[in-house]
Image (cartoon, helix red, strand yellow):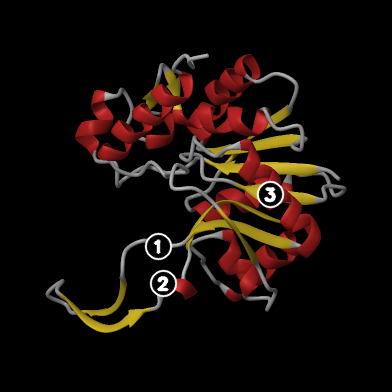
């Protein structure tokens, strides 16, 4: 079974905020430094450490192609790693990366470049589930009460319903699919002009059932300045010497 991983990393990181990003030396969250290395590299390392993964493809903006390729070539050993030009959207970036994969690829995992704390056990579980069912994502059950609202033009929300938490999950990544199924989902979305917020939403349109593997609240997506504080804490915990 040949497993490829795609990491879309061409985003502009607008939610991080210009001020905090400039302090870190970049305006894009995927390249902000965590313990001296870009967040993207931390994420790539997780999959490079997995014996289940055969190839890693990273999609970045054109201006970043050369230096990111050099960084990954220097830092990642024992895995085939490619860098391709991304698009103006996550969907386009993943589609560009999907186009360079070998046709004999069995499964494709798509992972947010700014989720650097995915663990090997979860990677194994979601790959195993996708190998069996064809489509699987990582998700967690929300701990907060979830309200459905109608947002007015004044930016004030009014509650319309309280949604049962036992029927909800917060989608994370990796999201893993059979190669041929994901190719078909992207082709259908392009033909219909559909833009999804994740890969699962594209596959769901084909009326394919997608399984959910329980993830972890440590598998955070770094999108705002306070997430960096939590990321540093998690990294310190992982690298701290363990008492015998």
What is the number of the mark on residue 172?
Answer: none
Nearer-N-terminus badge (2/3): 3
| Residue 105 place in picture, x, y as percent | 82, 47
Mark 1 neighbour class, 10 Å CA radius: few under 14, some 14 to 19, many 20 or more: some
* Quarter placement of the N terminus: top right
Q: Nearer the viewer, residue 37 or 236?
A: 236
Nearer-N-terminus badge (2/1): 1
Q: Nearer the viewer, residue 179 or 229?
A: 229
Q: Residue furthest bottom?
A: 160
Q: Is residue 61 left or right of residue 107?
A: left
What is the number of the mark on residue 165?
Answer: 2
Task: Give the quadrant of residue 30.
Answer: top left
Nearer-N-terminus badge (1/3): 3
| Residue 21 place in picture, x, y as percent | 28, 31
| Residue 89 place in picture, x, y as percent | 48, 53
What is the number of the mark on residue 125?
Answer: 3
Q: Residue furthest left?
A: 154
Q: How many marks?
A: 3
- The local secondary structure at tag 3 comes to helix
Task: Please name the residue that numbered disc 1 is placed on.
Answer: 142
């Amino acid at each position: 079974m040949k497993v490829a991983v795609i990491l879309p990393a061409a985003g502009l990181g607008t939610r991080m905020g210009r001020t905090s990003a400039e302090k870190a030396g970049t305006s894009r969250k995927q390249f902000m430094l965590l313990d001296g290395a870009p967040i993207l590299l931390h994420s790539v390392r997780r999959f490079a450490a997995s014996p289940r993964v055969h190839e890693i493809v990273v999609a970045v903006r054109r201006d970043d192609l050369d230096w990111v390729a050099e960084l990954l070539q220097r830092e990642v050993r024992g895995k085939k790693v490619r860098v391709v030009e991304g698009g103006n959207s996550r969907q386009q970036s993943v589609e560009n990366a999907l186009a360079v994969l070998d046709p004999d690829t069995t499964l494709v995992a798509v992972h947010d470049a700014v989720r650097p704390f995915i663990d090997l056990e979860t990677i194994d579980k979601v790959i195993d589930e996708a190998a069996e069912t064809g489509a699987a994502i990582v998700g967690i059950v929300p701990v907060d009460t979830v309200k459905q609202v109608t947002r007015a033009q004044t930016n004030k929300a009014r509650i319309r319903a309280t949604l049962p938490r036992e029927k909800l999950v917060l989608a994370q990544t990796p999201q893993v699919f059979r190669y041929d199924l994901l190719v078909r989902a992207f082709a259908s979305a392009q033909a219909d002009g559909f833009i999804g917020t994740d890969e699962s939403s594209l596959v769901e349109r084909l009326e394919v059932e997608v399984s959910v593997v329980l993830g972890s609240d440590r598998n955070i997506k770094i999108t705002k300045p306070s997430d960096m504080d939590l990321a540093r804490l998690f990294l310190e915990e992982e690298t701290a010497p363990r008492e015998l």
